[in-house]
Amino acid sequence: MLDILKELCAIDGTSGHEDKVRDYIIKHIGDNEYTVDNLGNLIVRVKGKKRAKNKVMLCAHMDEVGIIATNILENGLIKFITVGSIDAAILVGKAVKFENGTVGIIGIKPTHLSFGEAKNTVPDADTLLIDIGCTSKEDALKYVKHGDTAVFTNNFVEMGNKLLSKAIDDRAGCAVMLSLIKLGFEYDCTCVFSVQEEVGLRGAKTATFSVNPDYAIVLEATTAADIIDVPESESVCILGKGAAVSFMDRATIYNPALFKKAFELAEENSIKVQPKTKVAGGNDAGSVHSSRGGVHTLTINTPCRYIHSPSCVCDKTDLDNAMKLTKVMLEYFADV
């Protein structure tokens, strides 16, 4: 699974530009039937060893956060907005890469030229500009056009038992699902690699309507704030303590019985699991659980520090436990 995650994280794909991620996945799903809908969701129908009593869907999103060029100024600098939620403090001074390979730096006034309160204040994101080394609009337009997207540049690094990369949200979920497809399922299952999660859970909405599942498992990466100066009550989840299961977030209130069952089956199968202890964020479950007449939905998260940054960090064992729990819950939902 680590090789799959490394290769997925190396691919660039902001919301609405998931094509290369989707192409990679299609090359690795074997002979399984698939369709691509009008939004770009990849829907893979995997035959299991047994027919399922209930239709079960797995879902993970392919898109990552990034930026989109909105204007090219006369001095060659590029104005932009974010695609997905990125803290302005993270943007400052970061390198980004456009789809054609052009690299730029998100610039800021040098600290030596900042004084007073401005020296200690994070600028608003809409005041930042990208420098691609050009000195005129005419020159810059040779490399970047209006509407071009870019992502953070970063190398995939193993740090002992931890992994550092851009786009772990949610290439981790995609890697778990793709690894399970390669291993094969006990029961029939539909796997959705969704688009445009970071800008409003859009792909999952249409894909779930098409699949019409009885049960769904959303595979996601979620904030782990287990770092210095963050109170334990605000840590959300902790790296190395297993997959994190949500009971509520800003888009979904999860069925308490399914939340409880996840912990019961994890204990029975010696799988490390923890609750996501803060009601924050949201994921594709927000669209999935409210589709058609409603879908029984569970979210299994891989804890991730520094999420929505070029340096996301997750734990190898949490990935393994997320995959194990997903397999167990899938088999339970299929035959319940």
Image (cartoon, rainbow, N blue to C red):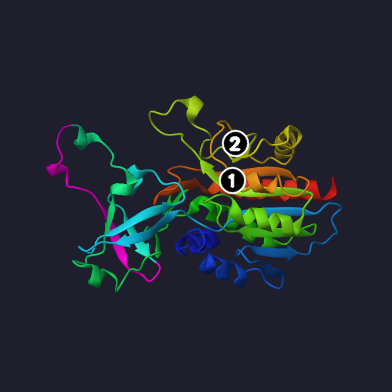
Residue 157: x percent and y percent? 41, 55
Residue named by callout 2: 249
For residue 278, which quarter of the picture? Answer: top right
Q: Give the vertical position of 329 relative to 12 (above or below).
A: above
Residue 132: x percent and y percent? 26, 64
Decide which of 264, 83 is in the foreground and name it.
83
For residue 4, which quarter of the picture? Answer: bottom right
Question: Disc 1 residue type?
Answer: Asn
Residue 82: x percent and y percent? 41, 52
Question: Disc 2 residue type?
Answer: Asp
Q: How many marks?
A: 2
Question: What element does badge 1 sit on?
Answer: loop
Magenta-colored stretch includes residue 101:
yes
Residue at 35% across, 45% down = 90
Residue named by callout 1: 283
Question: What element does badge 2 sit on?
Answer: loop
Q: Which residues are magenta?
A: 99-116
* Circle nearer the N terminus (1, 2): 2
Q: Quadrant of the C terminus?
A: top right
Decide which of 200, 277 is in the foreground and name it.
200
Compared across the picture, whether 124 is left or right of 20 comes to left
Determine contact: label 1, label 2, CB under 8 Å.
yes
Q: Give the vertical position of 278 relative to 308 (above or below).
A: above
Q: Give the vertical position of 186 relative to 317 (above or below).
A: below
Decide which of 26, 295 is in the foreground and name it.
295
Magenta-colored stretch includes residue 156:
no
Q: Quadrant of the N terminus?
A: bottom right
- Disc 2 crowd rating (10 Å Cα; few below 14, some 14-19, many 20+) is some
Q: Give the vertical position of 105 relative to 216 (above or below).
A: below
User: How far is mark 1 from mark 2, CA to CA?
Assistant: 8 Å
